[in-house]
Amino acid sequence: MPEPPRRWRFQIHLSTAIVLMFVAGGLIWANVTVTESNYTSEGFKEGRWNKAEVYDRMYGWPDQFWQETLERGANGEYVPVVPVRYRRRIIVRNALVALAILFVVWFLCEWLIRRRAARKGA
C-alpha cells in the first residue's frame, strides 16, 4: 500500500530563526529607545512672560508614537505640561513596518538556503 502524501506544514531553518530573533530584538530596541530634546520655551503664562526649560521624550520607530512633554518647575523638578500622547494609527503602522521587515528577512534567508542546497544538488 502506498504511503499517503505528507501534509504541508510551516517550517523554517534554525539559522533563519536565529537571524529573525536578532532582527526582532533590533526592532524592539528601536521602538523603546527614547529620543530626547531639550529646549527653552518662551511665552505668556499665568499673567506674565515666562521662559521655561522644556524636555520632550519621544518613543517609536520609524514614526514616534509616544510623546511626553515636561517643564522644569520652580523646585527644579520636571513636571508634565502636556498629557502623555500616544497615537494608535502610528503604532499599527510601526507594527506593519516591523512585520514587513521580518518577512523580507525570512524570505531572503530561506531563499539563500534553498539556493545553496540546489547548487550542492541536495
Image: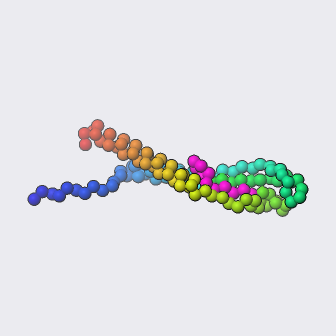
Q: Residue at x 70, y 61 (%)?
A: 83
Residue 84 visible in image: yes
Name the residue nearer the viewer: 12 or 107.
107
Is 30 magenta? The answer is no
Is 68 magenta? The answer is yes
Q: Residue at x 66, y 58 (%)?
A: 85
Number of numbered discs visible in the structure rendering:
0
List x then y, in percent, for residue 98. 50, 50
Please state if 56 lies on the left or on the right of 7 as rendered: right
Please state if 64 lies on the left or on the right of 100 as rendered: right
Please state if 45 lies on the left or on the right of 100 as rendered: right
Q: Residue at x 28, y 39 (%)?
A: 118
Locate residue 3: give its quadrant.
bottom left
Q: Where the N terminus falls, by quadrant?
A: bottom left
Name the residue nearer the viewer: 116 or 60.
60
Please state if 47 lies on the left or on the right of 3 as rendered: right
List x then y, in percent, for residue 56. 71, 53
Q: Where the C terminus falls, by quadrant?
A: top left
List x then y, in percent, for residue 113. 34, 43
Q: Residue at x 29, y 37 (%)?
A: 119
Most distant residue in the left direction: 1
Q: What are the residue bounds of the magenta stretch?
A: 60-70
Locate residue 67: give its quadrant.
bottom right
Image coloring type: rainbow
Residue 22 visible in image: no
Q: Is residue 111 above or below residue 48?
A: above
List x then y, in percent, for residue 73. 82, 60
Most distant residue in the right direction: 48
